[in-house]
Image: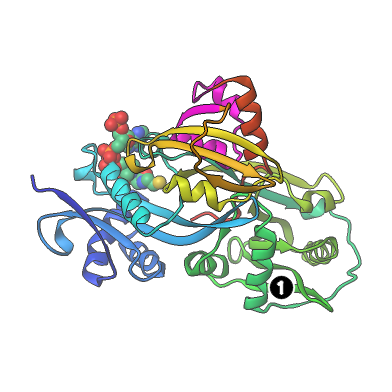
Amino acid sequence: MSRLETRLTSDPVDMEAFAPIAAWAFGNDCRSALEWLERGDPGCLRVASRGAPRGTSIEAGLLEIPMGQWFGGERLSMLGIAGVAVAPEARGQGVALALVQSTLRAARERDIALSMLYPSTYRLYRKAGYELAGSYCSFTLQLGKLPRVPRALAVGSLDGAAAEALYRRVARGRDGHVDRGPYVWRRVREPRGEPTRGFGVSDASGLIGYVYARPAELRKVPLELSLSDFVIGDRRAFQALLGVFAEHSSVAERVTWHGGPADARLLGVPERALEVRIEQYWMLRLVHVERALLGRGYPELDAEVDLEVEDAVLPENSARYALRVQAGKPSIGGAARATRRARLGVGSLAAMYSGFVSPRELATAGAIEADERTLATLGAVFGGPAPSSADFF
Ligand SMILES: CC(C)(COP(=O)(O)OP(=O)(O)OC[C@H]1O[C@@H](n2cnc3c(N)ncnc32)[C@H](O)[C@@H]1OP(=O)(O)O)[C@@H](O)C(=O)NCCC(=O)NCCS
């Protein structure tokens, strides 16, 4: 059998060849699968094929979604991966793993630091060096339990550029939130191609909160208002938007949105009207370990630790990283060995790096070798707010 090769493409012939594979993989029809591919960023479909140049020989594919991700208040380049699909005839032969590995290698060559995805199976992605690293929670607010609150601030139409700026300002403080690129913003504004309405709350300084909303199902009363984005910059914005929700309560039963397990909104909900569920855990991969360690923000502390990292998929990452943090500023290098040393695989590093599991929990899972003092130091260095994302892709 000839070698499996992967390539990025925007060729309609390739898209049409991959659409039935994606459709079958996700229980969709070919037309909708093709429309979904067309909503991807141009040239971001990666296909795997053997021999023949275009179209017919395609066995698998995935969508690359270039964007950023925040950790410790700093933005790192991140490649989102979605829609990994292998033709039924080609499954069980290592095609998906080879495709993901080749995607990671190409990402590293483009100096991308991280990769994130929502897994449908852990085994495949763990083999590729990903590990669970954050949550994606769903919130349901029961409007019947919500007192009607007078609005102190007016709610108006929404300016897209102002919404993007406010999202960035808020998301920067939430570890794991993505710096959305065009594809994710399209999903926010037109989830599955359906239009939304944006409502914004402003004060003299500009936009301080907004939602993008639509009915979860058309012509179904009582309504569920589904928010594809819900961002508040301060408490007044939250109160104003709660007021908007309450004013829909004659026909709407509930409002739903996604985000991290805890943020300022929880403190503003006046009654026990909120149901929360961890819908998914997402996985993270350190594509370029050095860039990832140097690019994130750290608490303002001083620490030194040698991290001995093993990476079977991208062996260039396998090395000893003498990580030094001085007043929160990271550097790597220096001949002198730190007194604190840890050994771990690149997947375990991802789970610790994001703050998803503490180093001590990693040790309990047998996923890191380090003494107690080193575990405590690593906990201080990588600890932070529970990593989360408001975006599924
Ligand atoms: C999941 C899918 C992509 C796997 O493709 P594949 O080419 O058969 O996978 P590979 O042969 O490369 O498997 C690599 C590893 O992952 C494991 N794996 C693959 N599919 C798995 C599954 N459904 N459950 C558990 N492990 C799985 C394999 O066992 C293998 O590990 P091993 O060598 O230790 O046994 C394919 O079944 C598919 O297209 N499914 C439908 C769509 C889907 O779920 N996509 C993933 C979206 S995130």
Cβ of mark 1 under 8 A from ligand 1 = no
Name above or below for residue 111 compared with residue 43: above
Q: Residue furthest left?
A: 1
Name above or below for residue 153 compared with residue 336: below
Q: At which x and y percent is residue 7?
A: 24, 60
Quadrant of the drawing holding the N terminus:
top left
Q: How many marks?
A: 1
Q: At which x and y percent is residue 278?
A: 61, 41
Name above or below for residue 331 compared with residue 234: above
User: Residue at horizontal 67%, vertical 76%?
Assistant: 162
Which secondary structure, mark 1? strand
Q: Which residue is mark 1?
A: 199
Q: Amino acid at mark 1?
A: Phe
For this view, does 165 lie left or right of residue 247?
left
The magenta span reads 341-369
Q: At which x and y percent is residue 262?
A: 72, 45
Quadrant position of residue 134: top right
Please say whether residue 353 is one of the residues in the magenta stretch: yes
Q: Which one is nearer the viewer's eye here, 60 or 319?
A: 319
Q: At which x and y percent is residue 117?
A: 46, 48
Is residue 117 in view from this perspective? no
